[in-house]
Amino acid sequence: MQTADKNMDWEHLLKVRRELHQNAELGLQEYQTSQIIKRELKRMGIPTESIYGTGVAAVIRGARPGKTLLYRADMDALPVVEDTGLSYASKNSGVMHACGHDIHMVCALGVAEMISRMRGKMHGNLKLMFQPCEENVPGGAKQMIEAGILEHPKVDAAFALHVLPDFFAGHYLADIGAVTAAPSWFEIEVEGRGGHASEPEKCINPMDSASRIYLEIQKLHHHYAKAANKTVVCPTMFHSGNAQNIIPDLCTISGTVRTFSEDDISKIHQDLKVICSQEEEGSGARCTLHFRTSMNSVVNHPEMTRLMRETIQSMYGDSALEKRPFYFTGGEDYAFISDLVPSVFLFVGAGRIEKENYPLHNSKFCPDEGMIAPTINLLSHFVQKYLALP
């Protein structure tokens, strides 16, 4: 890999990353996180403004007119008890950067520092968007857009990244088209007829119906998982009853749908309706389906993606591009941005060689910090290439 910029104080950036990790905060509570970001940008001579509560916006303005490129970095942590054993583990009990947002932020700060040195020669602007509350539906991106993050100056294109333990550090994935799943949510209320547990024949037990619905949903998942790339239909909650001698009136079953196709969302919604209707006819229970889609897939624009891939190849060679099929079935509220402006969402390998790598949102998640400097270097060159475009 190409040597990272020797003019950067990489040791300081590493300390900042660890400081952010130690001060992990939940969505819309990123007060200390926000202050750290503002402090670092002030050190670079970059003015900041608060936007949507704890969010931070900044613009590095070039001396010459040109386009405006947005770089989004999410800020919030997760309600997870950290179990990494790191010396810089979270000081906030039950809150952990288990999704790599601390890495996302420090990469954005590093790019800001590199690009800020070039503003005297720069055509156009780099706008920085430090976004709170990515982990909560519907996320903070929509609210920051409504607060004007894509205006003044008007944003022409955007990019963001997400670290992944699935690839080793030094590997990057940038595919054209939908690169994250569109998350939908369902809840099915099954209303039966309750009564004494000693006389089940006089009742309509809603748990019986909900159990059959659960099994039908599992069949639905297996059907779509085979027919479509990594489509997920997953029940996650089953609630009913409050006493051992009472058959309840109500049972609810809830879960999520993840798909890369709007057509599949509609089909699955219809399939769930059919499952509920058939159970009503067969059991006498009343089944009510609630279904909503919270955001679209993040879609990578062809030209922005090609530029990112060319930058990776020119700096680190073709072997740095991850080529095996990968489907990120998580939702990403960066989709609200990619819905509006040409975007590229880069997946960055953070897996550690010869060590066990735990998945995102796991209490032992520990990305390889060695990916930070090369990624900052890469993204800085990407920004320079984009702002050099006519």
Image (cartoon, rainbow, N blue to C red):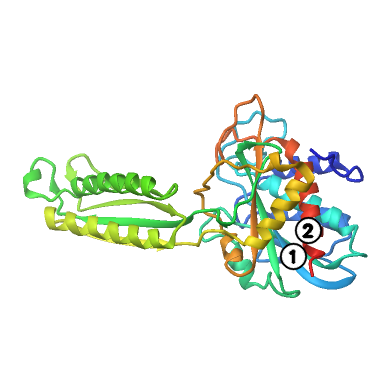
Determine whether 212 is above or below 143 in the image: above
269 or 44: which is nearer to us? 269
- The residue that appears at 79% across and 70% down in the rendered structure is 390
Residue wearing tag 1: 69
- The mark found on residue 295 in the picture is none
Quadrant placement of the N terminus = top right
Residue wearing tag 2: 383
Give amino acid for label 2: Val
Q: Earlier in the sequence, mark 1 or mark 2?
A: 1
Residues at marks 1 and 2, CA–CA distance in whole angstroms: 8 Å
Determine whether 373 is above or below 132 in the image: above
Determine whether 10 is above or below 152 in the image: above
> Mark 2: which secondary structure?
helix
> Mark 1: which secondary structure?
strand
Q: Residues within 10 Å of mark 2 (few under 14, many from 20)?
A: many
* Image x and y of residue 299, in percent: 57, 60
Identity of the residue furthest to the top in this view: 354
Give amino acid for label 1: Leu
- The residue that appears at 80% across and 50% down in the rendered structure is 110
* Image x and y of residue 17, in percent: 75, 43
